[in-house]
Image (cartoon, rainbow, N blue to C red):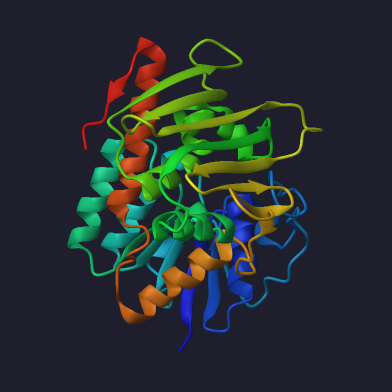
């Protein structure tokens, strides 16, 4: 029997998850929730994002379309609630779905605040269903391969690592919620957290963070640069910005310098530059992080297991790290992490 999914929110990520599920033989999307009646009627032409293709028209006649939340939670035919709603709604909806006995796949960031993350964790511990947080970069083929190479020790210790993630101003969200700091946390919590989570995944907890930022208005974080303190002889930095015009292309990249080689993820793929020998392109799995994460989560659900690649506690620590970075921006000093 296929895993039956109810998707909550038909924005860019909702469409992305729908497209992935549509390619999976062991999954069936049985219901979709949104407040936009046009989308529920199959007109997805307004759906756009900073990566991938925009929306098209879909025949949803075989899928239950819902404009009320209760229609999803009360549906006995739904095994998994996939939350792709605005960030400030994640905790409320995830807790309600868990209490209804559903498994939950929740888009990143886990929640708007670390305190909300903790409430989700507590609800999941008491629930029948499992909670999964969709930090896709842990599953992105080039990033996953880089982690495997670094952890193998084949090229020695890491000296430095630089991560960047840049985008045009995200004006594609429903009622422009991504530009509302109270709803999205703006660039730091929505965009930058991708690299924050991967840095924690690769290097573990830093001693402290030091951040600087700028924004369209005072108090906003639309561009942030952070240094992570891992002690002597390891420099780790991450930069993210989304203040660029719509003609500016989205980009994500990294450089990891080791004793015997440097790894670099660039537009032409993952490259290895050895200290001896020729540079070469590293082969990685096909597909993207969205596909690999959802296949992984569905596999965990089928076996009734938690994910070992991304736990709710991991996702909560990423939010706490971003909060420490925001505190560093305000205080203009290093901030120690308390987890």
> Is 202 on the left or on the right of 34, as rendered?
left
Q: Quadrant of the N terminus?
A: bottom left
Q: Nearer the viewer, residue 19 or 267?
A: 267
Residue 30 at x, y = what percent? 53, 74
Instruction: Give the residue at the far front of this rendering.
Output: 276
Does the image show residue 170? no
> Is 270 on the left or on the right of 319, as rendered?
right
Does the image show residue 310? yes
Residue 227 at x, y = what percent? 43, 26
Residue at 76% of width from left, 27% of height from top?
245
Q: Quadrant of the C terminus?
A: top left
Residue at 68% of width from left, 53% of height from top?
279
Instruction: Give the residue at the far bottom of this rendering.
Output: 1
Residue 187's quadrant in the figure?
Answer: top right
Residue 338 at x, y = what percent? 21, 32
Q: Is residue 178 above or below residue 217?
A: below
Q: Is residue 232 above or below residue 84?
A: above
Residue 95 at x, y = what percent? 30, 53
Q: Is residue 247 above or below residue 301?
A: above
Q: Is residue 250 above or below residue 11?
A: above
| Image label count | 0
């Amino acid at each position: 029997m296929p895993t039956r999914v109810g998707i909550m929110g038909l924005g860019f990520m909702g469409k992305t998850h729908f497209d992935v599920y549509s390619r999976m033989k062991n999954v069936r999307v049985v219901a979709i929730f949104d407040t936009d009646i046009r989308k529920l009627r199959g007109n997805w032409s307004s759906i756009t994002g900073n990566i991938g293709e925009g929306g098209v028209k879909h025949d949803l006649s075989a899928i239950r379309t819902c404009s009320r939340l209760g229609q999803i939670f009360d549906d006995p035919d739904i095994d998994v609630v996939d939350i792709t709603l605005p960030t400030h709604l994640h905790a409320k909806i995830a807790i309600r779905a868990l209490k209804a006995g559903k498994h939950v796949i929740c888009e990143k960031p886990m929640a708007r605040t670390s305190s909300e993350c903790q409430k989700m964790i507590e609800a999941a511990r008491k629930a029948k269903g499992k909670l999964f947080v969709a930090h896709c970069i842990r599953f992105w083929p080039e990033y996953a391969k880089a982690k495997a190479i670094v952890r193998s020790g084949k090229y020695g210790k890491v000296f430095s690592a630089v991560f960047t993630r840049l985008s045009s101003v995200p004006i594609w969200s429903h009622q422009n919620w991504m530009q509302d700091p109270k709803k999205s946390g703006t660039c730091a919590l929505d965009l930058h957290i991708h690299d924050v989570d991967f840095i924690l995944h690769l290097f573990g907890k830093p001693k402290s963070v030091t951040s600087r930022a700028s924004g369209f208005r005072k108090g906003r974080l639309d561009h942030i640069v952070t240094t992570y303190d891992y002690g002597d002889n390891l420099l780790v930095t991450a930069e993210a910005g989304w203040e660029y015009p719509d003609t500016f292309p989205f980009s994500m990249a990294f450089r990891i310098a080791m004793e015997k080689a440097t790894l670099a993820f660039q537009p032409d793929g993952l490259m290895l530059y050895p200290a001896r020998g020729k540079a070469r392109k590293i082969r990685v799995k096909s597909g993207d992080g969205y596909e690999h994460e959802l296949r992984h989560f569905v596999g965990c659900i089928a076996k009734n297991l938690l994910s070992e690649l991304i736990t709710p506690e991991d996702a909560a620590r990423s939010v706490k790290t971003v909060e420490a970075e925001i505190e560093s921006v305000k205080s203009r000093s290093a901030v120690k992490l308390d987890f």
